[in-house]
Amino acid sequence: MQPSAPIPEGAARRAALSAEIAAATGLSDAGITALLRDFYARARADDLLGPVFARVAHWDDHIAKVSDFWSSVALMTGRYHGQPMRAHFGLGLTPAHFARWLALFSATVAEHCTEAGAALLTARARTIASSLEMGIAVADGVLPTRHTPPQRPASGGAGADA
């Protein structure tokens, strides 16, 4: 997205960028919070996701935190200050949880948002779900923590005589 006017520095820059994204997508903080309240009501009633979210003791605090997260992710407000990866460790999440979360989130987004807003939120949700799923798999030892180092050439080339 190209800015329509020069973007100022610092907090004013962030506010201008947020306003531009909001104008282009129809997203707002109030809309994001309403969407999340609906999504979490559905998630809590879901057979697979419900037990995960049953652990949340203070729903108003949780909604406020995830609203700040999604405002930061979608509108670039910078309000969220937390560690989402760490928050998801130890919950017993599986690929099925992530697939169901993404399907339910995407369906809720489609009902609440403009086409542009839904496209932005679902794209970000896919990236976030993938990142969390991979991070949890690494933490659980399911995936290695680093890639296999490149193999040396069999003959010729640099380092062949090592």
Image: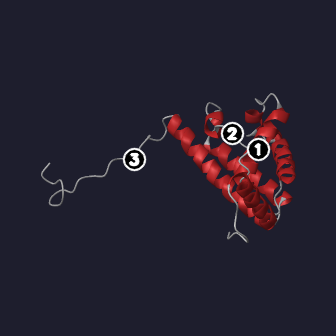
Q: Residues within 10 Å of mark 2 (few under 14, many from 20)?
A: few
Mark before the other along the chain sequence, 2 or 3: 2
In the rendering, at what x and y percent does residue 90 appear? 62, 30
Q: Nearer the viewer, residue 136 or 25?
A: 25
Residue at image location 75% in from the left, 60% down from the top:
16
State the mark number for residue 147. 3
Amino acid of disc 3:
His
Nearest to N terminus: mark 2 or mark 1: 1
| C-alpha distance separating marks 2 and 1 | 8 Å
Q: Which residue is mark 2?
A: 81
Q: Position of residue 146 (x, y in %)?
A: 41, 43
The answer to whether residue 10 is left or right of residue 149 is right
For the residues bearing labels 2 and 1, Cβ distance under 8 angstroms = yes
Q: Is residue 106 above or below residue 42?
A: below
Amino acid type at circle 1 is Asp
Q: CA distance from mark 3 to mark 1?
A: 34 Å
Label 3, residues with CA under 10 Å away: few <14, some 14-19, many ≥20: few
Which residue has dot 1 on it?
Answer: 68
Q: Is residue 117 above or below residue 50?
A: below
Q: Determine whether the residue tagged by mark 2 lies in a helix, strand or loop.
A: loop
Label 3: state its secondary structure.
loop
What's under tag 2, amino acid-wise? His
* Inter-mark Cα distance, 2 to 3: 30 Å
Of residue 123 and residue 80, the one placed in the foreground of this image is 80
Q: Nearer the viewer, residue 121 or 20?
A: 20
Give the SS element for disc 1.
Answer: helix
Q: Quadrant of the N terminus?
A: bottom right
The residue that appears at 57% across and 39% down in the rendered structure is 136
Depth check, mark 3 against mark 1: the one in front is 1
